[in-house]
């Protein structure tokens, strides 16, 4: 197996549905869903590899079945060492050496091309990709879209603006690791500041090469060069992406 590419983003930036698009368009790619996430082993055990994920609507973990047992075991051991002995890297990994150590089991065999879908490596994705000589498709969204997508409806969003409670999608972990103590912050403020930091960081690292997810759904041909490792397939695009969900 060789890691050939990364789908990099932040929570609620469209990375999982883009994973589905890549699997559809380039079947030879084994697209692994978030091996860099601290709860992924538990999620895989809870949902199973062939079960349709209730949030995403397709079996997001099925590609793990294509890995040999010794590769999975090596990965799980490293995952335990990185995440279960400390909470330091929960939510976001900002040390490229940790990410490289965690992902190395997927890069030591041949005949399989691995793509890593991750929402946790955005602070160091350029360094990690360089270590594996891999391409990166970096997804981004307007800050307001990211924030709104963290909450299921307008009532929840308004409640988040007034109240102090742990926001969804590990935002408190990201905030504490990269920004500071979230104590006293509303859930909305935590999510928004993390989203702003992500958008700024991605713009600095990738500039015009970053893929605006919402615009890609509406105007896919515009991003043919940005997603070049994955051919633009308008039929697959129409099948997978739904403009009504933007």
Image: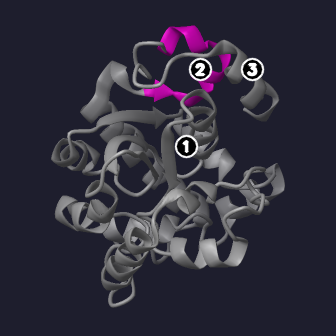
Residue at x 72% of width, y 61% of height: 50
The region drawn magenta spans: 211-223
**Does the magenta portion include 52?**
no
Q: Earlier in the sequence, mark 3 or mark 2?
A: 2
Separation (CA) of disc 1 from disc 3: 17 Å
Q: Is residue 165 visible?
A: no
Q: Does 152 sit above or below residue 80?
A: above
Q: Which residue is mark 1?
A: 15
Q: Does 122 sit above or below residue 17?
A: below
Residue at x 34% of width, y 73% of height: 89
Image mark for residue 238: 3
Quarter location, residue 21: top right
Separation (CA) of disc 3 from disc 2: 14 Å
Q: What is the x, y in percent for residue 73? A: 41, 78
Q: What is the x, y in percent for residue 215? A: 59, 20
The main secondary structure of the magenta stretch is helix
Image mark for residue 118: none
Q: What is the x, y in percent for residue 179? A: 33, 63
């Amino acid at each position: 197996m060789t890691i050939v590419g990364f789908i990099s983003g932040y929570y609620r930036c469209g990375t999982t549905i883009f994973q589905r698009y890549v699997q559809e368009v380039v079947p030879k790619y084994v697209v692994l869903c978030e091996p860099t996430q601290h709860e992924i082993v538990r999620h895989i055990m809870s949902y199973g590899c062939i079960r349709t994920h209730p949030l995403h609507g397709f079996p997001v973990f099925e590609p793990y079945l294509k890995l040999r047992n010794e590769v999975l075991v090596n990965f799980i051991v490293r995952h335990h060492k990185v995440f279960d002995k400390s909470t330091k890297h929960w939510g976001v990994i900002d040390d490229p050496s940790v990410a490289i150590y965690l992902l190395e089991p997927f890069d030591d065999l041949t005949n399989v091309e691995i793509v890593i879908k991750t929402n946790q490596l955005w602070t160091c994705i350029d360094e990690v990709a360089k270590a594996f000589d891999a391409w990166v498709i970096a997804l981004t969204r307007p800050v307001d879209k990211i924030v709104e997508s963290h909450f299921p409806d307008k009532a929840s969003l308004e409640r988040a603006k007034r109240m102090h409670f742990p926001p969804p999608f590990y935002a408190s972990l990201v905030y504490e690791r990269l920004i500071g103590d979230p104590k006293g912050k509303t859930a909305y403020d935590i999510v928004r500041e993390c989203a702003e930091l992500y958008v700024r960081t991605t713009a600095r690292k990738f500039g015009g090469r970053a893929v605006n997810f919402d615009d890609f759904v509406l105007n896919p041909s515009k991003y043919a060069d940005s997603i070049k490792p994955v051919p633009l397939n308008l039929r697959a695009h129409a099948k997978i992406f739904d403009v009504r969900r933007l």
